Amino acid sequence: MKSLAALAVAVLAALALFEVTMRPSGPERTQLLALFVAMAVGTSLLGWLLPRATGRLRSLRSSVLVMAVASVFAVAVAVGVAARLMFLESHDLQLLTVVLGFGVGLGVVLATTLAGQLTRDLSEIRATAVRVADGDLQARTGVRRADELGEAAAAVDEMAAKLAAAEEERERHEAARRHFLAAVGHDLRTPLAALRAAVEAMEDGLAPDPQRYLRSMRADLDAMSHLVDDLFLLATIEAGKLEFDREPLDLAELADESIEALQPVAAGKGVELRLAADGRVPTIGGAAAIGRVIRNLLHNAIRFSPEDASVVVSVANGDREPTVVVADEGPGFSAAMLDSAFEEFVTGDPARSRTGGGAGLGLAIARGLVAAHGGTIWAEPGPGGRVGFRLPAGVAAAEGAHPS
């Protein structure tokens, strides 16, 4: 319908121009109208037939060439008919025919040149798509155009880049998952082996102090229970199903309680725990959840602190946002580790590698609990480990929580 409307507008415009410039007589006007209508009908038929014919061709170059020749031919016919109506002499008509033929040849050359460039660019896009489909995610088209073909090439390149990034991320997570499963297996295998040995010793009557064996077995069971609880908590966080009560809290008091709870662990390593707080630091959230975050950060700091060092827990209300920062005197995080320190399967880098086992869930759980409160958590590069989190103030904290 759009093509027919365009042809009608072209006929009317040509007639109007002819009327203004030539001031034709009645018979001339009728004759010209018949000519224009006939040419418009012929053009519409070509417009209907050519797309169907060129759609069966196997080469874009051939399609463009056919379209170009048809367009030039339509112009040549129009000029030839007009010349015939002008009653030109035979010699003039022959000359005009030769010139029109030469024009058709020039049109074919230009169409072939254009079609060749289009074909090469399309071939590059097709070849790149095939390479990407075969797994070569570094393939790029190299096509730089400002038209729709350039947009298609840019879309293919962007798709390949995103697939490459997704594949790198998948491989990284797969490696981290294997590391994580190995760490969990290690942490389960060690207490299970100790339990098996203790049970066999008691069954064979080789336990000189059964009570000591029972205490050791209880410790191994507690270790496995803590690991299973951590895994369940992390799965709950990742599923978005974490629930906790919202209540007014004092972060300074929670930090002090966490320090007191981990004081025996720190003392066993000769690490001093200190609290730096300027009075109450109020917030709203789950006491158990936020306390768990502080304890996880403290436990991590104690583990990587040298002997006879100190760990400082700073609590403040900076910019009206309750903030907690745990700083130790260990090697700290490397700059490359900062972006992935809180991911689920990351257990550390050479500067803060695991010692004595550990699935590396502490920071991942801390991140999930802080996020559930609508806050943010971060780590700073070493030397010295610094990990902190910030919670929204006032109503924002309450809105970020998931009510139980």
Image (cartoon, rainbow, N blue to C red):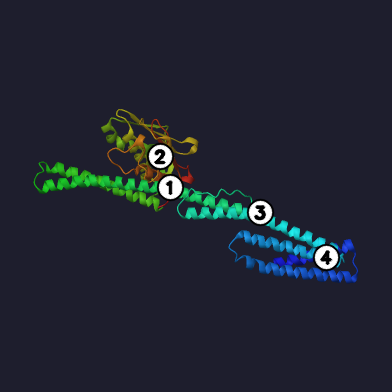
Q: Where residue 180 sits: x, y (%)?
A: 33, 46
Q: Secondary structure at mark 2?
A: strand
Q: Secondary structure at mark 1?
A: helix
Residue density around tag 2, few if under 14, some if 14–19, many if 20 or more, within 10 Å:
some
Q: Secondary structure at mark 4?
A: helix
State which tag comes first along the sequence, 1 or 2. 1
Q: Which mark is residue 113?
A: 3
Q: Is residue 15 visible?
A: no
Q: Which mark is residue 323?
A: none
According to the picture, the residue beneath numbered tag 4 turns out to be 82
Q: Where residue 124 sits: x, y (%)?
A: 55, 52
**Distance between the Cα atoms at labels 1 and 4?**
68 Å
Q: Is residue 109 left or right of residue 143?
A: right
State which tag comes first along the sequence, 4 or 3. 4
Q: Which mark is residue 169?
A: 1
Specify the quadrant of the image occupied by residue 69: bottom right
According to the picture, the residue beneath numbered tag 2 turns out to be 250
- Residue sitting farthest toward the left: 205
Q: Where residue 109 sits: x, y (%)?
A: 69, 56
Q: Amino acid at mark 4?
A: Ala
**Distance between the Cα atoms at labels 2 and 4?**
95 Å
249 or 1: which is nearer to us? 1
